[in-house]
Amino acid sequence: MPSENDKDIEIGNKVENVVAVASDNVDSATPVAVAPTAVVVVAVKPVAEQSVEATTNGNTVTAPTATVNKEQEQEQQQQQPKQETGGLQANIEPMQQSNAGKMDEDATLTNFKVLYVVTQLCGLTMIILVGCWVGIHFGGVGGTDNPKLEFNWHPLFMTIGLLFLYGNSILVYRGFRNVRKKTLKLAHAGIHLTAFVLTVIALITVFDSHNLANPPIPNMYSLHSWMGMGAVIVFGLQYVAGFTAYLAPGWREALKVAYMPLHIYFGLFGFVLAIASALMGITEKAIFAIPDYSSFSSAGVMANTIGCFYVIFGALVVYLVTEGSYKRKPIPEDTVLLTGVNE
């Protein structure tokens, strides 16, 4: 029969075995105190922690074995605001880009408006100067009974029709960008027609002044007359082709699309040709009709000033109509045109 001392040794061995098993589940940094005569119970708790409970002489000692990684929780909590901030920035960046684009567009439109007003002022100034020039220095205007005075209609009507109105008919789409395109087409054709009528009257007056002069003056011998007639022919052909293509029904859509680049190019070409012809004409008039032109007379200086305004007006029109950022953008009101084709 085992003695009491042997029983104590056996109990001590069992305790050591239990402690060894429990140590496998306990963090190496966690100390566990075991009494020689203790009964150890291992309790695994669900999530928060694991512990070893030892009962010694009726008292229970609990030792924690593991805890949740607090650092990972803190990192996750820190990452959540970053993710929310990143999403907010992703939404803000397109808005900022949109606002920046709108600001650039507004600035571009402001620049166009300023230059457009300057162009109109230059055009009106050159018309006023021509009127004052022929009125003050060449006796004004008259009819067929006075060929010299009848001639004075020629520079005035050419300046109004083939320069000022021609340039404005080109700019009408960009100058009135918020108007329906169908209305702009009608305005474009109407301004062209008015310019053409004034140009024809100007041609009649110059031929009359030559034919009714005593002795008669030959026609169409100067470079000015050749260039001027070329500009009138281009202008007339442009008007007929544009009217039949885009206002009167008849042209197929494919032909309209194919002709549009030619219509734009030759329209601008005719305008530049008209500016060049006007410069030649005013120089010719100054040389032939101003005796003291070389002495910087007031009539000669005014003629040169008119020529400068011709150049400035022409340059501004060409720039405004060729600058890509000034192009008119379609508006919702752009619907079916007179031809029945959507544009």
Image (cartoon, helix red, strand yellow):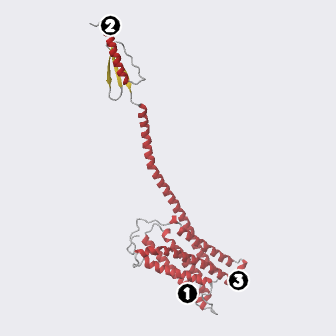
Which x, y percent locates residue 24? 37, 24
Disc 1 crowd, CA 10 A, few/some/many (<14, 14-19, 20+): some
The answer to which of marks 2 and 1 sits earlier in the sequence is: 2
Which x, y percent locates residue 277? 60, 79
Q: Which quadrant of the view contains residue 335? A: bottom left
- Please state if 297 lies on the left or on the right of 193 as rendered: right
Of helix, strand and loop, which one carries label 2? helix
Labels 2, 1: front one: 2
Residue under label 3, please give it: 291
Q: Quadrant of the C terminus?
A: bottom left
Q: What amino acid type is highlighted by mark number 1?
A: Ile
Q: For the point 45% across and 45% down, which residue is it?
A: 86
Alpha carbon distance from label 2 to label 1: 146 Å
Alpha carbon distance from label 3 to label 1: 27 Å
The numbered mark at residue 204 is 1
Which residue extends farthest right?
295
Q: What amino acid type is highlighted by mark number 3?
A: Pro
Of helix, strand and loop, which one carries label 1? helix
- Please state if 335 lies on the left or on the right of 172 as rendered: left
Q: Which quadrant of the view contains residue 201? A: bottom right
Which x, y percent locates residue 229? 56, 83
The answer to which of marks 3 and 2 sits earlier in the sequence is: 2
Q: Quadrant of the N terminus?
A: top left
Contact (CB < 8 A) between labels 2 and 1?
Answer: no
Residue under label 2, please give it: 5
Of helix, strand and loop, which one carries label 3? loop
Report the number of discs. Answer: 3
The answer to which of marks 3 and 1 sits earlier in the sequence is: 1
Q: Tell which of 129 and 230 is nearer to you.
A: 230
Q: For the point 37% across and 16% down, which residue is it?
A: 34
